[in-house]
Amino acid sequence: MFYREASQYKTSYGADQQIFPILQDRMGFLALMAIVFVVVPILGNDYWFNGLLIPFLILALATLGLNILTGFAGQISLGSAGFMGVGAFAAYNFVLRVDGLPILASFVLGALCAAVIGVLFGLACLRIKDFYLIVATLGSQFFIEWALTKFGWLTNYSSSGVITAQKIVILGVTFDTPLRRYLLVLGVVTVMALAAKNMMRGAFGRSCMAVRDMDVAAAVIGIRIFRVKLVAFAVSSFYCGMAGALWAFAYVGTVDPEAFGLERSLQILFMAIIGGLGSVMGSFLGAAFIMLLPIVMNLIGSTVSGQAIDTSVVAHVEQIVYGVLIIWLLVVEPGGLVRLWQVGKEKLRLWPFPR
Amino acid sequence: MNVGRVTRRMLAVVALGVGAVGSTVTLAAENEQFFPMIGWRTGPLTPLGVNLAGGWIDYMDLLNKRDGGINGVKLTWEECETAYKVDRGVECYERLKKGGPTGASAFNPISTQVTYALLDRTNTDHIPIVTIGSGRTDATDGRIFPYIFPLGTNYLSTNTVKIKFIGSKEGGMDKLKGKKIVNLHMDSAAGKETIPILEAQAKKYGFELTNIAVPMPGSEQQAAWLEIRRLKPDWVILREWGVAPAVALKTAEKVGFPANRIVAVPFAGSEDDLTAAGDAAKGVYVVHPMPPGEFPVTQEIKKYLYSGGKRGNLDDVTRMGTVFYNMGLTYGVINTEAVRVAQQKFGKKPLTGEQVKWGLEHLNLDEKRLKELGVWGLVQPIKSSCADHEGGGSAKVFQWDGTKLVPVSDWIAGDKSLTRPLVEESSTKYAKEKGITPRDCSKEG
């Protein structure tokens, strides 16, 4: 009833092929954009931007990158954080060493470096699959972390290896307040998410899914499997690299190899799985679940208990509840959060008589 | 599958969360000085987190219960759990920076990475970052880092203390000539941080320096120690942490290198690390800028907080007087003394971060003051200034007798003539990279 396509006639190919073919989706998307670009900046405070929204958006972008590779193309990777690191360090070095290069251009160049490195390690996928590929990408994770610590040139010979990212200045505007940084991150993430959504609906996305579902069949219908896999690696690493550059410049303000360790890779993989593999929206839902839920529980814990309960008890309870929630969610809905959303949509369509 | 139920529950969780976020800005009573605290009660560094927080909270609690706060201004604090994660640390900073009636007094990240992440934010938020025994060494230069305070002893000073101690064991600094010293360090950025200062000292005193890197996390060190056996050095400096120190000491015993020729850094030499190494640790030397042991203030804490069935912050009272607990006490003393100093200038009321920063810059903890506080011997004399955010630069050396750390020296002062040029070289480079004009300290009041 609320979500019915009846009487929405598509009279042209354009109308049939647009990114949100259903009116309600279009309205919903516009409303969402209005909320995040207008309402949130008006209502939010520094804590919302700096503590919650900026890291959430950046991790969602990285998850999206991994989702392109794992969810759409079926190549499981444990190297996402490493590629984030490549993006961050490359962007830092471009800003440092090339005078007058616009910062967004250096972000893009940094992300391109990540894409190149991603392809290099992705070459492994030409020969191996599944668990063996996980191990190969795990190797990339360790290699990148090691290289970033080992070669002083990359960190500009900083004594402790942790370097401070440069200021973000675009067209004379300095992005120094949390609100401005939020809008910058939001802008980049929105553009890249829409691009991903479009890419996955097009020829490339369909080839990816064909390779994922059955590579022999894909080869038979004329898809060049290796090329698709390598491009998927490149696109995925590009997204991760951009997320890494944003993480370093717009969130923590430092470029630090330890921020891009294995734990981050696993976190991103969990976000993709919990959110729902093979879905753009799932990446955002998963990032919200994995990143924001512990913080929300921590806030509830410390607000409810105050000083009365030992903080270590709160911290431990938080971890227990968090773990239980993940298991519970995967048991009731192995398809991830996005599957819940889709089921909900189906029900709304049949309302008031859902199955 | 019952999706309706699932979604309803999720909505409930989200609603609760939104409520909690909204209510964090709670109104506090007027006459309070607020300290945000980062917590590590879970995660890889739990022993450090629990005991450090214990010492710090106990000290502030003591001031509240015994003296009614600082000149009538009550101390309050809130802990925020990070499990030693950088992004959670930043989140906690943002969450707590506006707490209390005047905002956060000072933020103590206790983690080098979090300190770096907050570098830029402090300049706009005007909240001082206190990094005692951790953090960015070149922030000692207060002209370029106005809000960062690595008070006490930075890594470079600790290192010069080690060489001075080795010199005294050899019978004078001139006897170091021709001696062989191995710097066994973790193969990470922080592990390599002391190489330049060691090279400077090797040049000055004429000892032979060999740097040997141990790959992280250091659970296998056979190769490194075989190399050491081949070199036959006079001393080994152990710059390791985590699981590595215990492995190092056990491997040293296996290859036959005497423990009493090893000088360990503070974070390799807590009671937990040394106990883990068993008999192999007996005789090893450790340098501690925040020494273990019981002091008059410990007795006061026992009297006011732990007597008559009362309980302070620490669950396990036997941990009182350990390295980590005393670290917490030192954090408490330095932070609260900064508030006290600032109160003399700005009045006996809750102070803002900017005002506390003035206090941190004008600390003068001399022997008399430290004895009044009952922390003489625990906290080193500290005199900070606009240009010098370290203020101290000394450490004591201890020897592990198998069950406890026994002091073998008084405060040994670091060598500022060696450390300061390195600090300034690094801070000037940072200022140039970031386009910062150093403050003119002669004009600061």
Image: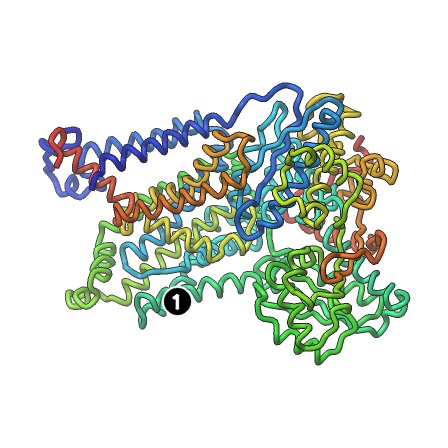
Question: Which quadrant of the rendered structure holds the N terminus of chain B?
Answer: top left
What residue would you read off at disc 1?
A135
Looking at the rendering, which quadrant does residue B54 occupy? top right
- Residue A305 percent location from the top left of the image: 50, 31
> Is residue A198 in view?
no
Q: Horizontally, is B440 left or right of A255 in the view?
A: right
- Residue B344 percent location from the top left of the image: 79, 25
Comparing A297 with A22, the one in front is A297
Q: Secondary structure at mark 1?
A: helix
Write the residue at 66% across / 48% down. B135
Looking at the rendering, which quadrant does residue A324 occupy? top left
- Residue A221 percent location from the top left of the image: 15, 65
Write the residue at 59% across / 38% down. B121
Write the residue at 41% across / 29% down. B18
Task: Write down the chain letter for disc 1.
Answer: A
Furthest-front residue in this view:
B308
